Amino acid sequence: KRQKNDAADAEAIVIAARQPEMRFVEPRTEAQQARGVLFRARQRLVHQRTELVNALRAVLYEFGLVVPQGIAHIKRIEAMLDDAVLPDLVRQECLDLLQQISEQSVRIDARTKKIRMLAQESENTCRLQSMPGVGPLTALAIEAFAPDLQSFRRGRDFAAWLGLVPRQFSSGGKERLGKISKAGQADIRRLLIMGAMTLVNWASRKAPAPGSWLARMLARKPRMLVAIALANRMARAIWAMATKQEDYRDPALSVAA
């Protein structure tokens, strides 16, 4: 049985098919695959633009010009190049990198526009966007990469599939929980955590309602941990919305119990 051959594969398939708890993955539709290709294309362009920005920052750093991370500081870099005393070769290289960054930004904006249009065409994605912290990117990622949510018995199962639950190291009747498992679809998990972090930061500035779930969590837990816990709650709410075909009833529940 340790060898890889057709007979061993056939036997394993039969054994798996007889397991009562075995779950099978449905193949994605062409529409899901097409949306996935668009999502990946935008993601690839963002990564390439980040590489270009970091390369430009590295060149400037060699000449004593320090620029913070992030695409938001591109205008600051342009102003630096106008005033800084740099060798002509270095200046030309920096201008070329700026041109490449600008071209990548145009491509990213085009993909983002397509994603927003697609997110408005589907009833499911429009419904998901009624939840605070869920935008067109997250809604389209769920539609493209998540399996049929009806295949999960409850919202907690969907959150566990996304890896938004602690990894267990339990033995001998003693429960030990570690960091989140990070199982399942990484893009959906990342976007939900980013959306949750935005809500946590917003609520921190506005002061959440006293006694609310978020207020209690922020009082005793680090902000990032609170965001992950909130992302877990968002995943469960998404499952309920998709399976019951209902809009998000009370947006305030994202920042208050």
Image (tube, rainbow, N blue to C red):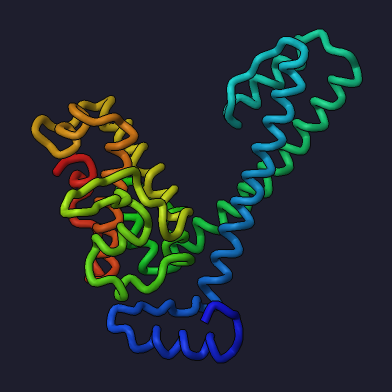
**Which quadrant of the figure contains the C terminus?**
top left
User: Residue 131 placed where, x, y %?
Assistant: 29, 52
Lateral position of residue 221 relative to residue 140, left or right: left
Please tell me which residue is depicted at 24% across the width and 57% down the height of the picture. Answer: 237
Q: Is residue 44 above or below residue 21?
A: above
Question: Foreground residue, 84 or 193?
Answer: 193
Please tell me which residue is depicted at 58% across the width and 80% down the height of the picture. Answer: 3
User: Residue 12 placed where, x, y %?
Assistant: 46, 85
Q: Is residue 136 visible?
A: no
User: Residue 154 placed where, x, y %?
Assistant: 22, 67
Lateral position of residue 43 relative to residue 99, left or right: left
Q: Is residue 96 visible?
A: yes
Please tell me which residue is depicted at 13% across the width and 32% down the height of the picture. Answer: 209
Q: As drawn, which residue projects farthest toward the left?
A: 211
Q: Is residue 254 above or below residue 146?
A: above
Please tell me which residue is depicted at 30% across the width and 57% down the height of the picture. Answer: 159
Lateral position of residue 29 relative to residue 193, left or right: right
Q: Is residue 129 above or below residue 102?
A: below
> Which corner quadrant of the image does residue 222 belong to?
top left
Q: How many labels, in total?
A: 0
Q: Is residue 184 above or below residue 6?
A: above
Question: Foreground residue, 78 or 64?
Answer: 64
> Which corner quadrant of the image does residue 136 belong to?
bottom left
Q: As drawn, which residue projects farthest toward the right?
A: 89
Question: Foreground residue, 153 or 111?
Answer: 153
User: Residue 164 placed where, x, y %?
Assistant: 33, 51
